[in-house]
């Protein structure tokens, strides 16, 4: 039960941060399609990339960000969003570059999926368990700057939740509260859990791989197949993106996978409860003020695109320049 509840908890966290916070999914837990496909998609990707992080001993936040970019590339074959724009749109919102939807690619691959679908669920899981990887310890230490940044993020998220639920307060409440309760229930089902549980045996990883292959194959042919590009160029861009992400990850250095207990200086479950209440308040305000949503939605969206570019550049610089300089200095010394 502990292992199953741990897996369900990670999946529920990924769904909360990625789908509910974006407003893309409302009460997905009441929708068979949401439970069988969307939940499985996020859970399987989290298990797949977290297993890789453990087995390669590359678990730093920058390395999880790189794996999260690979996570985000599913939006090509499965949803076709990286080629044809969002599923409810007639095409890319700001045109295409090299065959891919420009801003959608920046937001989803460089920002949203690495952070919301992958990193935040992992960090929150560690907060819930009270035990975290040593490479994440500094990120989980409470500071005024981090708390203010988290509050700003909750405000931004509330805008997306309100917009995705079409300013329907009941729908927004059900979406946020329902998924939060799922996280709470799965969190209570297992005790003495650890993030290390996801460094499971190879045969279980093989099952995850089989599921993902089946998911990609089924989705490719059954979810808007008419949106597949007719030229080879857009496919080449996605292939090169996978290769570059793989190169970044391969070039990054191994680090410790040691686990340490969280202390009083770190964020804890009480902080998660406080943030949940604050999010509830922000979502309520956003649903009741459509003018604010209309004003901030495009600003926040384009801000994420810019933020994604900056994070991507920083990650590449750290791997190819800073890390190389450190290694050179070590040799000279």
Image (cartoon, rainbow, N blue to C red):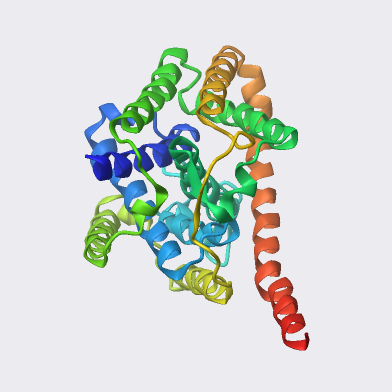
Whether 330 is drawn above or below 208: the answer is below
Percent across and percent down for residue 240 are 51, 73
Name the side, left or right, on which 146 lies relative to 90.
right
**Residue 91 visible in the current orientation:** no
83 and 54: which is toward the camera: 54
Name the side, left or right, on which 181 lies relative to 157.
left
**Which quadrant of the figure contains the N terminus?**
top left
Picture quadrant where residue 142 is located? top right
Percent across and percent down for residue 255 are 55, 66
Who's the residue at 23% across and 60% down the image? 204
Who's the residue at 41% across and 20% down the image? 177
Percent across and percent down for residue 259 are 48, 53
**Which quadrant of the figure contains the C terminus?**
bottom right
Who's the residue at 50% across and 18% down the image? 167
23 and 83: which is toward the camera: 23
Name the side, left or right, on which 178 lies relative to 172.
left
Residue that lies at the very extreme toward the bottom in this rendered image: 332
130 and 215: which is toward the camera: 130
Picture quadrant where residue 96 is located? bottom right
Whether 71 is drawn above or below 194: the answer is below
247 and 1: which is toward the camera: 1
Who's the residue at 65% across and 71% down the image? 319
Percent across and percent down for residue 120 are 52, 43
Whether 53 is drawn above or below 154: the answer is below
């Amino acid at each position: 039960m502990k292992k199953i509840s741990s897996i369900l908890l990670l999946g529920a966290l990924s769904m909360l941060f990625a789908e509910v916070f974006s407003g893309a999914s409302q009460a997905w837990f009441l929708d068979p399609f949401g439970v069988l496909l969307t939940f499985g998609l996020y859970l399987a990707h989290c298990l797949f990339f977290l297993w890789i992080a453990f087995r390669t001993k590359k678990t730093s936040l920058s390395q999880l960000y790189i794996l999260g970019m690979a996570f985000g590339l599913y939006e090509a074959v499965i949803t076709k969003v990286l080629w044809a724009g969002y599923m409810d749109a007639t095409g890319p919102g700001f045109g295409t570059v090299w065959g891919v939807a420009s801003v959608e690619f920046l937001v989803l691959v460089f920002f949203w999926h690495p952070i919301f679908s992958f990193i935040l669920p992992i960090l929150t899981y560690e907060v819930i368990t009270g035990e975290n990887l040593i490479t994440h310890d500094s990120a989980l230490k409470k500071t005024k700057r981090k708390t203010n940044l988290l509050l700003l993020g909750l405000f931004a998220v509330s805008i997306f939740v309100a917009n995705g639920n079409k300013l329907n307060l009941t729908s927004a409440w059900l979406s946020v509260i329902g998924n939060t309760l799922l996280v709470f229930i799965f969190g209570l089902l297992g005790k003495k859990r650890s993030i290390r549980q996801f460094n499971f045996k190879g045969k279980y990883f093989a099952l995850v791989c089989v599921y993902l292959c089946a998911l990609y194959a089924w989705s490719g042919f059954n979810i808007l197949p008419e949106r597949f590009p007719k030229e080879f160029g857009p496919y080449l861009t996605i292939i090169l993106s996978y290769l570059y992400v793989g190169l970044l990850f391969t070039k990054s250095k191994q680090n410790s996978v040691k686990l340490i207990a969280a202390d009083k200086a770190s964020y804890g479950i009480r902080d998660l409860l406080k943030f949940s209440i604050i999010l509830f308040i922000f979502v309520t305000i956003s649903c009741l003020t459509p003018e604010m949503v209309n004003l901030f939605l495009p600003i926040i969206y384009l801000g994420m695109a810019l933020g994604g570019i900056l994070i991507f550049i920083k990650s590449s610089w750290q791997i190819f320049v800073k890390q190389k300089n450190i290694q050179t200095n070590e040799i000279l010394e």
